[in-house]
Amino acid sequence: MSRSASEKDTTRRDRRPTTRGPLSTVAAMFASARTCVALLLGAIGCHHPAVDHAADAGTAPTEDEWQSAREGARAVLENHCSECHDPGSPNALAAARRVFDLGAIEWSARMSSAQLRDASGRLGGSAVPTLGDAEALPLHVSDAERVTFLRFVELSERRQSRDQ
């Protein structure tokens, strides 16, 4: 049996290597590991080029840079924490809103550096913090979201040190 030219082309295309082989899996794991290391270093106060986006980590961010980072962090929290921290949620908790209130423009104004770092650590967890273990919900925060939030934490700390 003879194949037509289009069938032969299809057969050749089917034999091309895909990007889903073992090497791409290792590359993806390595990229994810680099991100995790960057996040961990940032969480303990060390700077890493993947997280510290400013050329000089000692300079305070501009107001526009900080506000942009704050709104990026707000988007991350709205995706994962709004059930307890958004006043529009039927399940909003007064105690949670005292820490940060997603309904406020300056939602992070009352948060200390330690509270921001704690929130960053919680975003790295596997379950939403709740009142009890029976209520725990899975938490699926992407590496990109963690980096976005950590950038805001870093800029906030630099801003606070400028204001002191």
Image: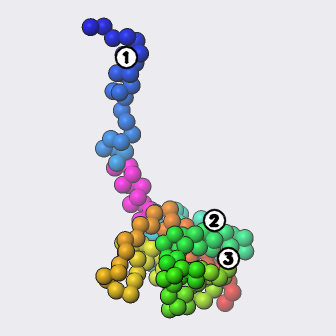
List x then y, in percent, for residue 96.
50, 87
* Nearest to N terminus: mark 2 or mark 1: 1
* Residue density around tag 3, few if under 14, some if 14–19, many if 20 or more, within 10 Å: many
Residue 87 found in image quarter: bottom right
In the picture provided, is 122 more to the left or to the right than 2? right
Mark 2 highlights which residue?
A: 55
Measuring 33% from the left and 27% from the top, which residue is drawn there?
15
> Considering only vertical position in the picture, is 94 above or below 22?
below
Measuring 34% from the left and 21% from the top, which residue is drawn there?
11
Q: Amino acid at mark 2?
A: Ala
Numbered mark located on residue 60 in the image: 3
Query: Gap in Å between the C-alphas at discs 3 and 2?
Result: 11 Å
Q: Amino acid at mark 1?
A: Glu
Query: Split into 4 quadrants, where in the image is the N terminus?
Result: top left
Residue interval drawn in magenta: 26-37
Residue 104 found in image quarter: bottom right
Mark in the foreground, 3 or 2: 3
Query: Gap in Å between the C-alphas at discs 2 and 1?
Result: 55 Å
